[in-house]
Amino acid sequence: MKRKDKRPQRDSSANDRNRERQQARPPARPAKSEKRGEGRAPAPNPARAEHKGPSNPKRKARRTGRNREHAAARPEAPRLHLPPSSFGPSSSVIDERTAAVEAGLGDTEIDSEEAFELGIGARVVPPTTQYGEAFDSAPPSTHERKGDVEAQIRALEARLDGLIRQRHFADATTETESDEPVSERRGALAKTDSSPPARLEAAEPPIEDFISRKWGRSALRSRAEEFDDFGLDPSFEQRVKPIVEFLYRSYFRTTAEGIDNVPAEGRCIVVANHSGALPLDGLMLRAALRIDHKQKRDLRWLAEDFVYYLPFAGVFMNRVGAVRACPENAERLLEKESIVGVFPEGVHGIKKLFQERYRLQRFGRGGYIRLCLRMRAPIVPCAIIGAEESSPLLYRLEGLTELLGLPYFPITPTFPFLGPAGLLPAPTKWRMRFGEPINLDNYGPEAADDHVLVGRLSERVRSSIQAMLDSGLRERRSVWFG
Amino acid sequence: MSNSLTSSHSLTLAEQGRLGAPPTRRRVVAVTGAAQFLGSNLIGLLEEDPNVRKVVCLDSEAPTTAGAKSRVYNVSLTEASAEERMAEILSAEAVDVMVHLAFLDSPSHSTAFAHELESVGTMHVLNACRRTKVHKVVMRSQTLLYGAHPTNPNYLSEKHPLRARRSEPFFADKIEAENEVLRFGRPGQGRIATVLRIAPMLGPTVDNFVTRYLSHRLTPTVLGFDPLWQFVHEADAVRALRLAALCDVPGVFNIVGDGVLPLRTVIKLAGRTTLPMPRSVASGFTTALWLTQFAEAPPAFFDYLQYICVADGALARKELGFEPLYTSREALIDYANAQHLRDVRLLSETPA
């Protein structure tokens, strides 16, 4: 749901269209209607005389509860007691389809008998006599809490039934046009029809009678769009994007050399050196592929475990694209043909002192090589020059590790003497060099179990990155201007 | 409507392929915990299933959904004679499949009773099955048993060890029961054991500690943590159980809805306000609330407010042919809609 849609609409006596929209969405923000009811006295409003709905929904609900079993059999059964889900999951659809509803689709009069015959939400069809015209002419008062909500629910039901009927007819017509005669079509959404199996599978999964009676129609299959599988929040990323771009372009003045070595499509592992008391290299690597790569590729980097123990840091890293470093996550990412950024030095990379800068630490047990062999992904080595000087680590206090949950407590020229501001990285000039992709396709997936081979390949990648670092450092004339 | 027509209607293609030709002898399914939420809904679903001949309902009260196919027996799993009585019933009714659902959905203060019911009760059920040649047991388990840890992968597969805190009886009893069931189904004995690890259920009618947690106006969270959560819709959970009862697929399966949501988004979508508390304050606070019976979950559940515990449903999709109808988000919205009606007292029905 978009942010905009969540904004409460204050004015219930606005024009009809506004009101329609509001009615269409009570489930999304019922807290508001509740509040509204409490804010003012829930006194009965004389202006509501036209509303012919039942005056006491509570009593009505109780009555329904008693003979719930038979409710499905009676088209004129009280509406209030229908399973809420019958307008539940679809309410999100309402938002998307408001335009369609306003185009008149939602205003179709629902003939309850016809709908019942069709088998569509037989319990959900509102009787036109009860509120059809009266409802349109007299806007529901905001003072009468129950009546208001009830009216909204009824309007919503009517609209949904219209939508579903429309949709069903659309489905039916397309299917009859294209395929064999459909004799058994019963018209119920809940029932699956005897159309060809392939079609059946492509459509939504059929629902059992009991399910459709109890929980209403099934949810329309739509993915939760706001968060991806690994916790990246696109809207949050959009918000921090200006900051990241500022850091990438203006602050570090990053140049990405040989970025075309990263394949334009398909899975790939970018292996880079890790550095800095405050590791920004993952974020910058992601920015580099987003900004400078031709295909604007999406890189997810693997972050060390300790980050996820920390409050705020773990959530922040997760929302901007870091994924916890473990083989399961990396495999899943590669299966989705995305690029995975790996820092095989791990914690040892970010806790090396200033005098050890640009000396690659050991590359763990070569888990990333095994990953490459198993997943048939090429490796792109990457040397990041300049990051080591941006937050140089002078000393690390190991004694505080247990207390803080950090692998070390950093002492930099500015931190902790300048307080949190001391964590700000120095504006050094960054250079990223991407090497030729290393293809391991000539080894089979079974090579992943060969420890000697994995160690050798890992060392090969490590030395190629070290060579790139060394040549880059030789060419560099200034830390600040490159 | 003829039976064959219904059968082709009520099963998805994947399910049909799994079931193969309709079995010559239709099944007799026994359900423990029949009056509980999952049990009663599963009975409602099986009542309509043409592949089921009879449903044997075992619980200390009668399920409301029991119909023409159902035989209701009053059995209490916490009694010492439970095994004897169960064995009698199972052999008298010639039960084929046992669906074992007698587990507590929410943590309870009476841990001794919970232990008798879940751990010892499972032993009674399995022994009764062994004595009467019931060849298949389906058990309901939970993805919560994986435990919330910062070192969890984003999607836990069925092979991942169960790392929930054993010090919390709610988890320990269920893990014990699950191990017993898997031992029952060890290969070479001609028996089938299917364990469904179901994600936290949400929906319009279900009532468990998650729905109660989300029903507070102010919902406590931990400052600086926002783990990803996942849900499964109650209807999907019931469908998965039916599928497991009718398809002979041994093994452990995660039953989850698609998609994940961060906890704060969950609370916002449910229309509540977050109450972030620092970790040091919150752990003492939740302990106090649990001891005074104001909180719905003991302090061990505090982990789930901080760290990820999300399971991967790919195996159930592939081998069991289970397709969830609702995503996590849709399940949540479905729950929230009903909860809001409950809040304004429009829905008088208490959740199951």
Image (cartoon, helix red, strand yellow):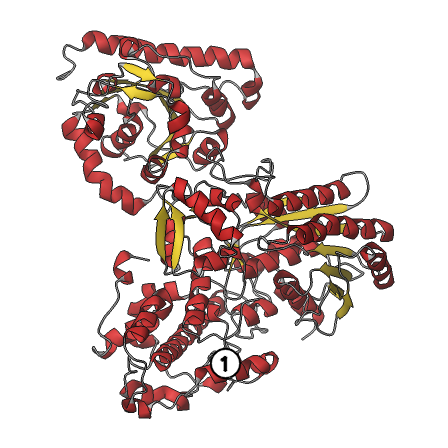
Q: Identify the chain of the residue marked 1, using the numbered disc in the image.
A: A
Q: Position of residue B312 (x, y in %)?
A: 53, 43
Residue A423, visible in the rendered structure: yes
The residue at 47%/78% (across/down) is A124
In the image, is B116 to the left or to the right of A191? right
Q: Position of residue A263 (x, y in %)?
A: 34, 28
Q: Is residue B152 above or below residue B63?
A: above
Write down the quadrant of residue B22 in the picture.
Answer: bottom right
Write down the quadrant of residue B4 in the picture.
Answer: bottom right
Q: Position of residue A382 (x, y in %)?
A: 32, 19
**Disc count in the image?**
1
Write down the quadrant of residue B31 in the picture.
Answer: bottom right
Residue type, label 1: Ala
Disc 1 crowd rating (10 Å Cα; few below 14, some 14-19, many 20+) is: many
Which residue bears the numbered disc 1?
A: A61
Q: Position of residue A181 (x, y in %)?
A: 55, 70
Q: Is residue B221 above or below residue A333?
A: below
Q: Is residue A213 above or below residue A254?
A: below
Question: Of residues B156 and A133, which is closer to you in this image?
Answer: B156
Q: Quadrant of the C terminus of chain A?
A: top left
In the image, is B300 to the left or to the right of A29? right
Question: Of residues A398 and A106, which is closer to you in this image?
Answer: A398
Residue B134, visible in the rendered structure: no
Report helix, strand or loop for mark 1.
helix
Q: Quadrant of the N terminus of chain A?
A: bottom left
Question: Of residues A8 and A448, which is closer to you in this image?
Answer: A8
Question: Of residues A187 and B289, which is closer to you in this image?
Answer: B289
The residue at 45%/17% (across/down) is A364
In the image, is A242 to the left or to the right of A454? left
